[in-house]
Amino acid sequence: MQTPLGWAAARWTLSPRALRWATTAALIVSIIIVFTGGLVRVTGSGLGCPTWPTCDGTSIAPSAELGIHGVIEFANRLLTTVIVIAVAWVIIAARLQKPRVRSVTRLAWSQFWLVVANAVAGGITVLVGLNPWVVALHFVLAIALLATTTLTWHRVHEKRPGPDGAVSPATGALAWLLAAVTLVLIVVGTMVSGAGPHSGDSSDVPRMQLDWTTVTIIHGVLGALVFGLALALFLANRGTDARARLIRRRLIVFVLVVLAQGLVGTVQALTGLPASLVSFHLLGAALVWVGVLRVLLDVHPALFARVGGARESAAIS
């Protein structure tokens, strides 16, 4: 039985440029959502709309009685509509390519299901009164969505070097280790937030029963480890071919982002966690995650690409 997208693909074709624009839009919006989610938290607007899926039990939009907190939370919810439109654009553009690139189509659909999961998690977060563990899960799901939008963007935009672009097993293993430790760093960061003072609402919201100082130190040590692993990967990547040069350039950018993120984190910890810095630290976490995924994909170009992926890549580049 033919699906509606299959029916459309049999009649129309969208250009590779349309797919590139679609994946760029989805990536940008998924980064913005991480940032605006941080704004909701630090402004104490997490329960600005006290119910879900409606805002106050009777209307989707906030009433005047809910004030600025209701507006902030409602604006963040509206971004879900924007990401749905962007992801739908990716799905349609990927399906209407000639030839069809199935790996990109699968990644596009994974974005859709993660948007759904994140929306449900956001609703549950409100219904359980901003339980810090559920809030952390909500953020992790946002990071998972960001992973899929990054992977899709990279697969669509990548330009692969020639056959001289092989890397050593040590370089490949280091790239995986760097990505894994970065993920742990981000997850521990949710615990730092969950044990910290920014609960997401002006009322008394329970915090994670963790020692904030200890968790923060662990988070800092993990950040230093990520920095060290990135330097080790840079030194291990001694080749002079096109792929080695590309990886080194990517690592330089990644290291700079990690250093900036570490600086923001250190300053906010020493200055009482000002709201503005906390928000930008969350944005930095999103950029660090995008950066490490791009390093991983440059080291392992066949990742999430089926056999014959080079031919697929050439078709959409």
Image (spheres, rainbow, N blue to C red):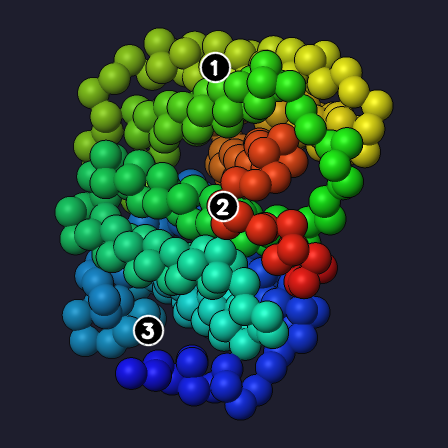
Q: State how far apart marks 3 and 2 are (Cα).
A: 40 Å
Residue type beneath disc 1: Leu
Res. 222 mark = 1
**Quarter of the figure that contains the N terminus:** bottom left
Indicate the quadrant where residue 242 lies.
Answer: top right
What residue is drawn where x is 49% and y is 45%? Answer: 304
For label 1, the SS is helix
- Mark on residue 131? none
Q: Do the residues labelled 2 and 1 touch (CB within 8 Å)?
A: no
Number of other residues with Cα within 10 Å of mark 1, as a class: few under 14, some 14 to 19, many 20 or more: many
Instruction: Pick whichever of labels 3 and 2 is earlier in the sequence.
Output: 3
Disc 2 crowd rating (10 Å Cα; few below 14, some 14-19, many 20+) is some
Q: Which of marks 1 and 3 is nearer the N terminus?
A: 3
Name the residue beneath numbered marker 3.
Answer: 61
Residue 48 shows in the view: no
Q: What element carries label 3?
A: loop
Q: Residues within 10 Å of mark 3 (few under 14, many from 20)?
A: some
Which quarter of the image is occupied by the C terminus? Answer: bottom right
Residue 122 seen? yes
* Residue 125 x, y percent position in the rendering: 23, 48
Which residue of the protein is positioned furthest toward the right in this rendering?
240
Q: Which residue is drawn at 82% across and 28% down?
A: 241
Distance from disc 2 to disc 1, alpha carbons, whole Å, reads 27 Å
Is residue 119 positioned above or below 278 on the image? Answer: below
Residue tagged by mark 2? 304
Q: What residue type is labelled 3?
A: Ala
Give the residue drawn at x 67%, y 63%.
315
Compared with 235, 197 (above or below) is below
- Secondary structure category for the residue under label 2: loop
Residue 237 falls in image quadrant = top right
**Residue at (72, 44) in percent of width and height:** 160
Q: Toward the viewer: 16 or 52?
A: 16
